[in-house]
Image (spheres, coloured by chain):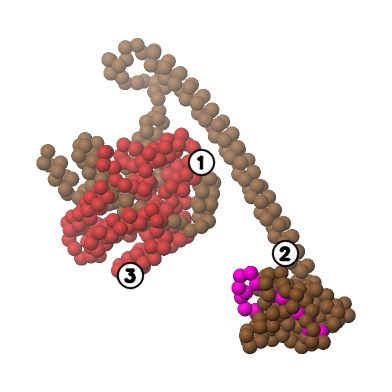
Amino acid sequence: MPHIQDYIESGVLELYALGELSPAEQAEVEAQAARHPEVRRELQEVQAALGLYAEAHAMVPPAGMRERVLGHFAAHAHAAYDTDSASVAVPPATSSLRAEVDEMTRPQPAAGSPVVRPMSTAPVAEEPTRRSLWAIAASVALLLSLIGNALLYSRWQEANTNLLALQGDQTRWAATQASYQQQQGELRAIREQNQILRSDEFRAVALAGTPAAPTAKARVLYNPATRKVYVDVKNLPALPAGKQYQLWALDKGKPVDAGMLAATTVAGDSLQQMKDIASAQAFAMTVEPEGGSVNPTLSTMTVIGNI
Amino acid sequence: MSDSPPISIPPAAEEELVKRLRARDESAMTLFYDRYSAALYGVIFRIVKAEDEAQDVLQEALVKIWHAFASYDSSKGRLFTWVINICRNLAIDKIRSKQHRVGSRTTGLDDSLTAQRQSAPTTFRPEHIGLQEITKQLVPEQRQIIDLLYFEGFTQSEVAEELNIPLGTVKTRARTAIKLLSKLIR
């Protein structure tokens, strides 16, 4: 069939797949495809190629869009949908839906009304009338049942939506509660630190970097009356694995262990309370094996400061 | 067809989805979203070129697909073909209704096309890299013509005008490009 080949070669199938044809031209292509397997095959290939082209440009929608789009769908799945506006965009598909709907809603001849019927199809006049009466009765019953179902369904959906909303609220509330408690904890810690910082009894001892770590900087808050010691890190060099900073109080030239610095303290996150110190004239920090040493490794001294 | 092309959305999975949608199974739309949103969003975004508008279109498309599903005829083509056309039509309607095109048309075709190509790779899904390679084998004029028709929503005569070529050439060039694509995926 050479003319079929010409038809295929004309490019009309490509235009069909690209949505470039008028409804009449679309119908023509569909008719040709239904009639000729080679047209159908070619059309499928064209559609597959364009589908692939689309997929090659796939983009994952931004986060959060899934919930919004599916939420919108859930809200509109039961709403009456305006099929007239729908048919504008997809003419070939909805036109057949249209035909089916028209077919279903076409008025049935009522009993007793004058009906012109060819002789051959009306051998007994009464039978079709009765049948159509039954059909009407059945249709009415079906319609009522459908309406009932629709009502029940929409109520059920409503209840479902409310339930989902409540569950959402509950989850949000629990999350808020948890973060509130966490914030309370943080607030308490900050208040304590604030008290220490504001207290007149505490003396701030600035610890400056040694030549080995010139940018290192920390501060000790020392209360000789209560013997309390806090350390506040500004900047300390990162530690090698297996090492920890150890604070020393120097009392008359003798080093006294004041405790190990936690990693969060080294990072400068918060103040850390150290061991109580009875008397000191200076504080210093050294790098020691984890857990600390009895005597400071002087070569690793990072910061030092006099009271 | 025995020589089915290597498409990342397998026809078997599609059949299952069609069955559930036909049975009016609402939860199937979640599956539908997970399977098709990237492909649909890619096409929509390239047409409307803005995230919130792309979301509007995708949203509208899902509702439409659900309500018009009875009119999907699997003998006329794959579900994917049907839904992507719905999305394209809605997206094109959107830019037309906003007179969006008047502005964006004059910004220069080359700028907008190259901008899209440059921004695209970060959002490509890894499984599509093979597909991307395939489409790169099209010569620029072929890509351009498909992009204009498919992603920009131009009509044939608008393309002819834009590229300053005869209408007949639009047709043959589109055909050659699509022909080459289907040869490559086989």
* Same chain? Circles 1 and 2: no
- Do labels 1 and 2 touch, CB within 8 Å? no
Q: Are marks 3 and 1 on the same chain?
A: yes
Subunit bearing disc 1? B
| Chain A shade | brown
Residue underneath mark 1:
B27
Label 3 chain ID:
B
Q: Residue flagged by tag 2: what amino acid is it? A: Gln
Res A204 visible: no
- Which quadrant is the N terminus of chain B positioned in? top left
Name the one closer to the observer, B79 or B109: B79
From this viewpoint, which residue is outermost toward the right? A225
Residue at mark 2: chain: A
Rendered residue at 44%/21% (across/down) = A135
- What is the drawing colour of chain B? red
Inter-mark Cα distance, 3 to 1: 41 Å
Amino acid under disc 3: Asp
- Seen in the picture, residue A129 relative to B125 is either above or below; the reply is above
Q: Is residue A123 above or below residue A99?
A: above
Determine which residue is flagged by label 3.
B111
Of A85 and B145, nearer the camera is B145
Secondary structure type for disc 1: loop
Magenta residues, as a range?
A: A236-251
Q: Image height check: is A244 above or below B56? A: below
Q: Position of residue A271 (x, y in %)?
A: 74, 74
Point out residue A268 in the picture as x, y percentages from the top left corner.
Answer: 68, 75
- State the residue in front, B67 or B132: B132
Judge the density around disc 2: few (<14), some (14-19), many (≥20) Cα neighbours within 10 Å: few
Q: SS for tag 3?
A: helix
Q: Which mark is residue A183?
A: 2
C-alpha gap between disc 3 and disc 2: 50 Å
| Marks 3 & 2, CB-CB < 8 Å contact | no
